[in-house]
Image (spheres, grey):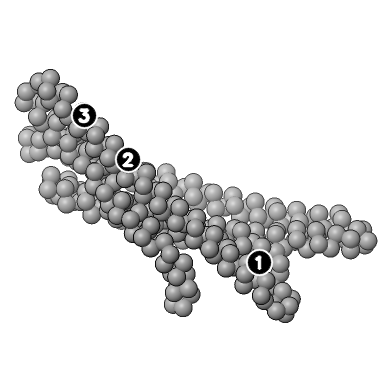
Amino acid sequence: MEELKKFARYFKPYKWHVACGILFILFSMAFGLLIPYLVGKAIDDLGSAVTWEKVIYYPLLILGINLVSGIFLFWQRRLLINASRHIEYDMRRDFYAALVNQPLEFFADNRVGDLMARATNDLAAIRQIVGPMILYSFQAVFALCISLPIMLGISVKLTLLLLIPMPFVSLTVKVLGAQIHTRFEKIQEYFSSITARAQENLTGVRVVRAYAQEDAEIEKFQELNREYAAQNLRLVKFAAAMRPLLLFFIGLGFVIIVAVGVPMAVNQEITAGDFTAFIFFF
């Protein structure tokens, strides 16, 4: 809890940037999700009577709303990504300031390579959490909160059928996500070891050459490097498997919706425009 409070204080100077960024995510998603509704309305309206006014009106309206959504998208990314960069800068500055004030015993207990890895790779990973993770998480939450009521309003039956593949999606994310997290931690450890080995050899290059240990040190570094590459390849396998599995289960939901929704539209249980809008929301 104490560590979380220390981490949260870095957000304080940029709280308005983050708050406005989250607000712009809401506006962007709201305008963006208005487009499927308008597409469905246009199909129903044009199905009853096609006029030049309607043909011009709906595309221009959709284009205008898309432009407004894009403006909010630009500002949400600018605010949140900028804030994440500033927070990374502040943390790196404080990390360095803390290092130079440590007693000599601290550097005897901690390898310089480990400290270098934390100052580079680890802080870059934190920036990804601060920026993109906040961005994508709120996008997903707002999309669900806005689209789900609209989809229920179109058809409760189709919405419930859409939820059939969701447990499989959640299980895939949970299982593969846990594996990715575990392997990412191992990669960070090996990166730290590689950095430490390189730093020690570069600092003590005279000793290495004096004892003719060049080949031995190269072989040790190669072992670490090979294992680091192997750990990355294991991570890639799980990361590569996750997206196809998610797309498969989402595609399964799409097949169910089409198989049930098309007959409903033909039997006029829902309009063609509503069915099209539902597909767009999906």
Q: CA distance from mark 3 to mark 2?
A: 15 Å
Q: Amino acid at mark 2?
A: Gly
**Left or right: residue 193 compared with residue 85:** right
Q: Is residue 10 above or below residue 252?
A: below
**Left or right: residue 211 compared with residue 69:** right
Query: Callout 2: helix, strand or loop?
Result: helix
Nearest to the observer: residue 49 or residue 153: 49
What is the number of the mark on residue 115?
1
From the image, which quarter does the N terminus lie in?
A: bottom left
Query: Callout 1: helix, strand or loop?
Result: helix
**Left or right: residue 9 compared with residue 212:** left
Q: For residue 183, say whether it is visible.
A: no
Nearest to the observer: residue 183 or residue 104: 104
Q: Position of residue 73 (x, y in %)?
A: 34, 45
What is the number of the mark on residue 70?
2
Q: Position of residue 270 (x, y in %)?
A: 9, 38
Q: Residue at x 38, y 57 (%)?
A: 17
